[in-house]
Image (cartoon, rainbow, N blue to C red):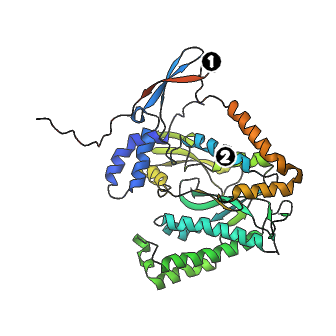
Amino acid sequence: MGRPTLEVADIFRAHGPAWREAQRGHLSLAQLKVMSAITQCRTAALGGHVLRCEGCGTDQVSYNSCRNRHCPKCQSAAALRWLDARQADLLPVEYYHVVFTLPAPIADIAYTNKAAIYGQLFDVAAQVLQTIAADPRHLGARIGATLVLHTWGSALTHHPHVHGIVPGGGLSADGERWVACRPGFFLPVRVLSRLFRRRFLEELQRLHDAGKLRFFGEHAGLADAQAFTRWLAPMRKCEWVVYAKRPFAGPQAVLAYLSRYTHRVAISNSRLLAMDERGVTFRWKDYRAKGRTRYKAMTLACDEFMRRFLLHVLPGGFHRIRHYGLLANGNRRHNLATIRSLLVPSASTTSALCDEAQANTEQAAAPPTFVCRHCGKPMLIVRLLGPDPAIRAPPQALVA
């Protein structure tokens, strides 16, 4: 695949320096680091290596990636590595897709409280799924879920929500049998929505009481306990958006979906159409429209485009993909082995041998890291290119 005509990096290079100066004191260190990483990605600034083809002898210079999780160019390889690790976790059951969305007023205060509120969104959504699934009136089983955080809408607005990928069933309370959900139906959405609303507001109030929320600008008054309680009151009555999509068409469809969602950034380079005197034009999807009319083009001033893109920079060390319940990292392997033995009893003793044989085969047949674009033969690294010297290195001491 060729290089896109326009990239986010091109916008940052052309308009980033002036905008950074105009926003001095208003951009966080994390946002500045993201801008720097994206502009330097796959350039001589990060160094690289010279490759030589084993077949035709062609030399090629390849520059290093920044590997920043907000960079549009660095996510495809990361997604493939993650999917390879997750392929062994798939079960031969239906999978369901559920989405938990925060109301706009809470999304507004979430921007200045990302770690606290995004983390609470993860935990409450997982707790709600497990609570309703454990209820004998619904499923009566212990389930697992993989949750992925997205903080953007198609127009780059701040729209925090989590996507959940959930197997259609779970283990019974005694762990002795697999309890499958009804075909085509996982859990009642209205029940999930009501419990999600109550539990999230309770946890939000707890965060406020503990002094873990910060308020600025028009929300500064919410630091007062009574004002915050009054502000929460209308949200106890409005509808909270929780919806479930139809089940996936088999495990491969789950992997295809995950490859598009797990490592997605606010906007991909392929959606950028033009950058000119009017600003940046990009494709977006209007979910309120139907049919082909929902796909539209939007033009934003370059400063506004950069501002919206940087709205979605996550706090350092914050995990945007999390596993809960039966799929939690601590006991996932044991739980999956138990479930497979219940679903296919005869496969329990041979699954480990098959997995090991498959792993050995895949390792032996692993494709080369670099392939010649002319003849398709493997390319070998013949020379390393060091990165440019650090701009902010201290001056060397003068020798008398």
Which of the 4 quarters of the picture holds residue 397? top left
Is residue 338 shown above or below 66? Answer: below
- Report which residue position mark 1 lands on: 375
Q: Is residue 16 left or right of residue 309?
A: left
- Report which residue position mark 2 lands on: 85
* Mark 2 secondary-structure assignment: helix
Q: Residues within 10 Å of mark 2 (few under 14, many from 20)?
A: few
Instruction: Tell which tag, 2 or 1, sits nearer the viewer.
Output: 2
Residue 291 shows in the view:
yes
Q: Residue at x 48, y 51 (%)?
A: 309
Residue 301 position within the rendered picture, expressed as x and y whole percent measured from the top left: 44, 49
Residue 152 shows in the view:
no
Residue 102 position within the rendered picture, expressed as x and y whole percent measured from the top left: 59, 67
Q: Residue at x 61, y 48 (%)?
A: 296
Residue 261 position within the rendered picture, expressed as x and y whole percent measured from the top left: 64, 50
Is residue 255 shown above or below 315? Answer: above
Which is more N-terminal, label 1 or label 2? 2
Q: Residues within 10 Å of mark 1 (few under 14, many from 20)?
A: few
Between 119 and 363, the one nearer to me in the picture? 363
Q: Is residue 179 left or right of residue 45?
A: right
